[in-house]
């Protein structure tokens, strides 16, 4: 194969990808019991919108590790999935199709969800293939497919039978926009401007000022709390207050959670405004008044304001209080509220019947599990610990939605007890299927459970799903526990935590030994995280890949280490283009000297100082890059390779060796040997990051002699001390410094870099430097080089 004058990634990259697929280059060998398995629990992207460059940024990182491990001889298990059940997909369908399930019916809505998710997944797969991810597509799964539903339902039943899952009527976090209960982990904080109202509560003698941002909750007020040490209100504890406008008589109670520095120090407890209200309600056995319904509107308990949204009711009730002289003050306030991460809607706390998985009881076990996992970067382990330590709710896994995995049970119409299916019948849809046996009470009429599982209840089982836990136990034993979980930092509290919970409960083991946490891809302004559901940024990933190349985009993705955010910067992607072009040009230069070249087993006698320096630097590079990849530090690996290529190989060594290579003869052998090993080593080290251009160059220059059909099937370079040469390393640095001095000399005089100079006079240096005459003649274009004297190296240029 002869290298083309110009490298065309638009043609070369798809052609290489097609060949990789056709030859099964990235296939996991399930029947190979000799090699160690390196299994990756790849994030299944949620089907909630268009993928963006932030996804390209983070998903490339997992591929860096997969390719590195594969070249190191591991049997890499690298599947891909699609998280296409649950609320994210439903909201996408609602946006795209302009319909809701309540409008078109459950069955029709699910059909819409399936159609939209299937189309989105085809686009997702096309992008991952174009990026060059070395996925084994034979193991692709969907979280709505039959196997995933079977595993999710089996896992739920396993927890239910062991008392680790339970159903309870209790206050839950509710999203009025999505009309479902959600879990604590799905909350974000949002800053907003609001009003801090000071209201007048009546006393049997006098009044009590109470401050609140939510006057619409007055009809649900069941108590007023003050701090037990607050001298202002100590005499009021145990007395009662009259709620303004609505008139209920409520107790004044003392509790340390009441902040005397906030507002007036007197706090109304309503069922429910926030988690503090829930805690007080439970601790003090207070009554329950439900004034907000599941649509976020006031109930009949709030008459005459029933039917208003909470925002409208807030304004109307504040106005009514003002008209009656019950509003003492209203001041603007910057407030942090808890919102649903999917829609940024402020959540409510409603009483409802929900399914939960116990996590609070086993908090210490989950903390211990986190300590046994290697987090990259290490500080992400602290985020996990902080989340677990601050849990205040068990995990709510039921959702009042439609497109998800159904809970596999029915309720007896006679006694109300749940009836579970046989495990061999899973997966089931209780709304479509009937039990095969009567209830223990003899009843034969059943009501199906209509709630579906939260999408995390399925995706928390991705190790079990990709390992085909129930259908292929042999595969599962081969890959579990998995080696690596790559993911983003904002889902440590969900995906990482929930997966650890499920593996602990179902297997008594860690799900994986290491976690690699990627940062976010940021919009060009550098402040806003890109989001699928919010449009995905100004430039699409496929357009960027087509404009530049997969390798150029991957070059950008390798520029910031794990845990660090990266701004979408086209200049940096263009730097990747330039590196690919320069690599190709170096390959074309080397082709005339390496075509058909079989290097001897031992270093030839005719090597110069520059040859030995390049070989020693290649040995250093291999050790440094290997160490970086083993530490999941691909950014350092890229930096080391880039420095070697530009500073050592392209800018200096090739200029030192060029004359000998062109002249031929005995002096050429050492240069060919060094160029062969230096370039081959660097290409292999670079292959996990830039897999396309490195493979194209390898196939043309090295496949016949190195012995592999693709660079990705070749052995990782571990040179050890084969080319160690401390003297050559020192001399090589000096040679590079001398070359820089001569270039500066020419530039200052307006001479071209290829212009000759009469002579170089080099003072000082050791024997290795003094043996580099040919190298200096080549790189400086000097007609003569003279060495004299001892001590520190100095150069005098004779023009």
Image (cartoon, grey):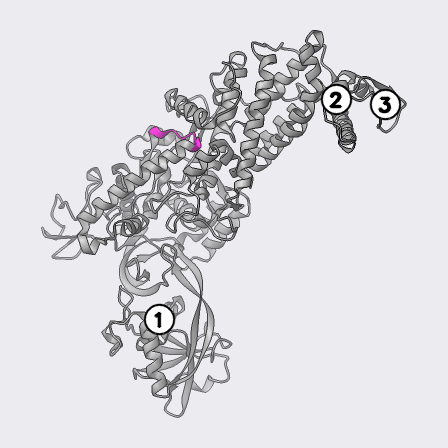
Q: How far apart, in angstroms, are the residues tagged by discs 1 and 3?
A: 90 Å
Q: Please tell me whether residue 127 is drawn above or below residue 94 in the rendered image.
A: above
Residue mark closest to the camera, 3 vs 2: 3
Other residues around mark 1 within 10 Å, as few (<14) / some (14–19) / many (≥20): some
Closer to us: 228 or 246: 246
Left-right relation of 34 to 312? right
Badge 1 is on which residue?
Answer: 281
Q: In the image, is residue 771 above or below residue 131?
A: above
On whether residue 11 falls in the magenta region, the answer is no
Residue under label 2, please give it. Answer: 728
Element type at marker 2?
helix
Q: Is residue 728 left or right of residue 313?
A: right
Q: Are marks 2 and 1 in contact (CB under 8 Å)?
A: no
Please report whichever mark, 1 or 3, sits nearer to the chain's N-terminal start.
1
- Of badges 2 and 1, nearer the viewer stands 2
Magenta part, dominant SS: loop
Q: Answer yes or no: is residue 243 visible.
A: no
Disc nearer the start of the sequence (3/2) = 2
Is residue 362 shown above or below 199? above
Percent coordinates x, y for residue 87 in the rendering: 30, 51
Spot the residue most to the bottom.
Answer: 205
Q: Residues within 10 Å of mark 2 (few under 14, many from 20)?
A: many
Circle 3/circle 2 CB separation < 8 Å: no
Q: Quadrant of residue 167?
A: bottom left
Seen from the viewer's position, the closer of residues 731 and 160 is: 731
| Residue placed under numbered mark 3 in the picture | 761
Is residue 689 in view from this perspective? yes
Would residue 635 be found to the left or right of residue 157 on screen? right
Query: Where residue 339 sits: x, y (%)?
Result: 39, 60
Q: Quadrant of the C terminus?
A: top right
Bounds of the magenta segment: 131-138
Secondary element type, mark 1: helix
């Amino acid at each position: 194969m002869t290298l083309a004058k110009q490298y065309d990634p638009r043609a070369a990259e798809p052609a290489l990808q097609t060949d990789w697929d056709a030859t099964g280059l990235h296939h996991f060998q399930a029947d190979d019991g000799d090699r160690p398995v390196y299994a990756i629990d790849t994030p299944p992207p949620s089907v909630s919108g268009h993928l963006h460059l932030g996804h390209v940024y983070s998903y490339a990182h997992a591929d860096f590790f997969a390719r590195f491990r594969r070249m190191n001889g591991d049997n890499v298990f690298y599947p891909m999935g699609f998280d296409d059940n649950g609320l994210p997909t439903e909201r996408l369908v609602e946006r795209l199709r302009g319909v809701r399930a309540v409008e078109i019916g459950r069955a029709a809505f699910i059909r819409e969800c399936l159609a939209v998710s299937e189309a989105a997944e085809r686009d997702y797969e096309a992008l991952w293939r174009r990026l060059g991810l070395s996925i084994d597509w034979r193991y692709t799964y969907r979280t709505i497919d039959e196997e995933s539903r079977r595993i999710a339902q089996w896992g739920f039943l396993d927890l239910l039978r062991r008392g680790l899952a339970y159903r309870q009527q209790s206050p839950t976090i509710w999203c009025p926009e999505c009309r479902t209960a959600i879990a604590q982990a799905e909350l974000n904080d949002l800053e907003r401007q609001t009003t801090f109202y000071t209201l007048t509560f009546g006393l049997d003698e006098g009044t009590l000022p109470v401050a609140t941002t939510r006057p619409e909750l007055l009809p649900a007020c069941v108590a007023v709390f003050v701090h037990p040490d607050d001298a202002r209100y100590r005499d009021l504890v145990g007395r009662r207050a009259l709620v303004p406008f609505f008139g209920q008589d409520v107790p004044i109670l003392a509790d340390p959670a009441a902040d005397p520095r906030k507002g007036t120090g007197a706090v109304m407890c309503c069922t429910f405004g926030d988690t503090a209200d829930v805690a007080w309600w439970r601790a003090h056995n207070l009554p329950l008044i439900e004034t907000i319904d599941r649509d976020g509107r006031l109930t009949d308990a709030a008459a005459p304001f029933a039917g208003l949204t909470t925002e409208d009711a807030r304004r109307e009730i504040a106005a009514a209080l003002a008209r009656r002289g019950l509003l003492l003050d209203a001041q603007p306030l910057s407030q942090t509220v808890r919102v649903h991460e999917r829609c940024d809607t402020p959540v409510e706390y409603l009483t409802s019947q929900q399914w939960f998985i116990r996590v609070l009881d086993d908090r210490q076990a989950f903390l211990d599990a986190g300590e046994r996992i290697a987090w990259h970067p290490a500080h992400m382990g602290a985020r996990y610990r902080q989340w677990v330590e601050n849990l205040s709710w068990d995990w709510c896994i039921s959702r009042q939605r439609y497109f998800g995995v159904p809970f596999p049970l029915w309720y007896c119409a006679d006694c109300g007890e749940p009836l579970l299916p046989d495990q061999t019948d899973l997966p089931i849809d209780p709304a479509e299927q009937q039990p095969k046996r009567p209830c223990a009470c003899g009843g034969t009429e059943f009501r199906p459970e209509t709630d579906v599982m939260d999408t995390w209840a399925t995706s928390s089982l991705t190790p079990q799903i990709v390992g085909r836990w129930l259908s292929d136990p042999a595969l599962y034993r081969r890959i579990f526990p998995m080696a690596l979980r790559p993911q983003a930092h904002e889902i440590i509290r969900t995906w990482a935590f929930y997966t650890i919970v499920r593996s602990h409960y179902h297997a008594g083991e860690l799900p994986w030994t290491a976690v690699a946490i990627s940062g976010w891809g940021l919009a060009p302004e550098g402040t806003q995280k890109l989001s699928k559901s919010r449009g995905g940024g100004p430039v699409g990933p496929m357009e960027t890949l087509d404009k530049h190349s997969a390798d150029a985009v991957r070059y950008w993705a390798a520029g910031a280490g794990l845990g660090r955010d990266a701004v979408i910067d086209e200049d940096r992607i263009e730097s990747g283009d330039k590196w690919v072009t320069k690599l190709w040009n170096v390959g074309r230069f080397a082709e005339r000297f390496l075509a058909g070249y079989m290097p001897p087993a031992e270093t030839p006698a005719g090597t110069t100082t520059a040859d030995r320096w390049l070989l020693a630097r290649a040995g250093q590079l291999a050790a440094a890059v290997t160490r970086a990849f083993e530490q999941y530090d691909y950014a350092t690996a890229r930096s080391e390779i880039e420095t070697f290529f530009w500073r050592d190989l392209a800018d200096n060594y090739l200029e030192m060796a060029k004359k000998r290579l062109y002249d031929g003869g005995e002096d050429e052998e050492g240069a060919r040997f060094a160029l062969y090993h230096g370039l081959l080593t660097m290409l292999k080290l670079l292959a996990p990051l830039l897999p396309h251009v490195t493979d194209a160059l390898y196939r043309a220059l090295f496949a016949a002699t190195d012995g592999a059909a693709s660079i990705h099937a070749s052995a990782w370079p571990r040179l050890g001390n084969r080319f160690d040469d401390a003297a050559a390393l020192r001399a090589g640095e000096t040679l590079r410094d001398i070359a820089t001095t001569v270039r500066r000399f020419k530039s200052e005089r307006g001479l071209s870099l290829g212009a000759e100079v009469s002579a170089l006079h080099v003072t000082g240096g050791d024997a290795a430097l003094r043996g580099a005459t040919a190298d200096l003649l080549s790189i400086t274009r000097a007609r003569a080089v003279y060495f004299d004297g001892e001590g520190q190296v100095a150069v005098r240029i004779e023009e």
